[in-house]
Amino acid sequence: MRHLKAFEDALNSIRDEGRYRVFVDLQRHRGAFPKATARFEDGEREITVWCSNDYLGMGQDDDVLEAMHSAIDNFGAGSGGTRNISGTTRYHVDLERELADLHGKTGALLFTSGYVANDATLSTLGKILPGLIIYSDALNHASMIEGIRRSGVDRRIFRHNDIGHLRALLENDDPDRPKLIAFESVYSMDGDVGPIKEICDLADEFDALTYLDEVHAVGMYGAEGAGVAQREGIMDRVDIIEGTLGKAYGVMGGYIAAHATIVDAIRSMASGFIFTTSTCPVMAAGALRSVSKLRSEEGVKLREKHQASAQLLKDKFRDAGLPVMDSVTHIVPLLVGDPEKCKALSDTLLFDFGIYVQPINYPTVPRGTERLRFTPGPVHDEAMMDELVAAILAVWKQLGLEEAA
Ligand code: PMP
């Protein structure tokens, strides 16, 4: 086989660094999440999932599933084409209306994932705004980095959440050039939150557009689950809000919400939107049901339960002397600081205790900050948490990590 050696070498260097990825093959059971069955070479095992981004369990919600069953029965499996060529259904249109309304915008546009939404939108902006400069937070997600890189525009990276640095960069550039600031609300690996208001103030001062990734916030923050900008009452100050349907909404897909003219331009020019088969109608139907359910009173209750669950787990980790990282959100990261120990901890929890939490290693996080990232939700009860803490403490000692605790 030609060039196979190069592939083997690449894999070996990833293995040597302890960051070779092994997927756990899961089967979730209706109504039983976070319990699931994992399949291994030597058989199956019942496990508890602690690292799902189906944060609220909506992927198992009866109403969402019912909406999806009905869409399959009436609309079939795939969408049958790009949005332009027979791939638009009533679900796509209604979902876009719902998302625009959720974010208080006049338009919204669906993509096949949040990754594609970021990449396709950001890479297109340079074609629309000649001379554009994009200011990007240093911890922005790979999909934003890729979109900005592909846009070919000048870019400036500001230190994570550092308003002073962002200001200095803005001051240093030609005031007449168009500008856009791209950042996130909830940062998914640390669980901290971007200074949205301060960035919007700077954007006003420097006449810049704002682009906010609310992927880890939609469904979970704000009165209707529109995200942190809604919670802070400043959705109208953010020009483009990007979100996913694959995490708190429990389905799949991504979107942007913005002024209808901005949306129309992206719709007309972004290759990642134009040249691909549109989302399956069943996904759009499920997402529509999920979004509207999370806007309701039921959503409010789920959000309260979610936050309480995250707080309880943080408290239990702290009480047990485990190095839980500072997080002001539902994301609960436990610092391990070594890729091999991080992987060993995760493996032992899985094989010996039936506890599934994926190790997070470089390049997802900087070297030396390897961690386990827990995402407790309304589906995790206190008994599960106590089991989890006891298991971690046992393995922690076994791996000689106790000094850190
Ligand atoms: N933005 C952020 C901040 C993310 O963490 C992710 C995915 N983990 C995405 C965008 C991509 O979203 P999706 O999974 O829907 O592709």
Image (cartoon, grey):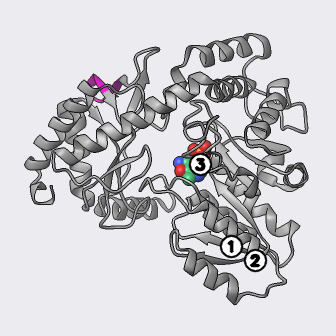
Is residue 152 visible in the rendered image? The answer is: no
Q: Residue at x 37, y 23 (%)?
A: 36
Is residue 317 visible in the rendered image? The answer is: yes
Q: Which residue is mark 2?
A: 206
Give how far across and how far down residue 295 sits, in percent: 65, 29
Which sits earlier in the primary sequence, circle 1 or circle 3? 1
Give how far across and how far down residue 146 sits, in percent: 63, 63
Q: Which residue is mark 3?
A: 228
Q: Is ligand 1 less than 8 Å from the beta carbon at label 2?
A: no
Region in magenta: 36-47
Dominant SS type (magenta): strand
Which sits earlier in the primary sequence, circle 3 or circle 2? 2
Q: Nearer the viewer, residue 247 or 212?
A: 212
As measured in the structure, the alpha-carbon distance from the residue carrying label 1 to the one carrying label 3 is 18 Å
As measured in the structure, the alpha-carbon distance from the residue carrying label 3 to the one carrying label 2 is 23 Å
Contact, CB < 8 Å: mark 2 with mark 1? yes
Relative to 217, say whether 90 is above or below.
Answer: above
Relative to 1, say whether 369 is above or below.
Answer: below
Q: Residue at x 84, y 44 (%)?
A: 107
Q: Which residue is mark 1?
A: 202
Q: Is residue 40 magenta?
A: yes
- Which amino acid lies under the numbered mark 2 shown in the image of this protein? Phe
Callout 3: few (<14), some (14-19), or many (20+) C-alpha neighbours within 10 Å? many
Callout 1: few (<14), some (14-19), or many (20+) C-alpha neighbours within 10 Å? some
On the image, which quarter does residue 33 sit in?
A: top left
Give how far across and how far down residue 37 sits, in percent: 35, 22
Relative side of 83 to 299, left or right: right
Q: Quadrant of the C terminus?
A: bottom left
As measured in the structure, the alpha-carbon distance from the residue carrying label 2 to the one carrying label 1 is 6 Å
Give how far across and how far down residue 299 sits, in percent: 57, 27
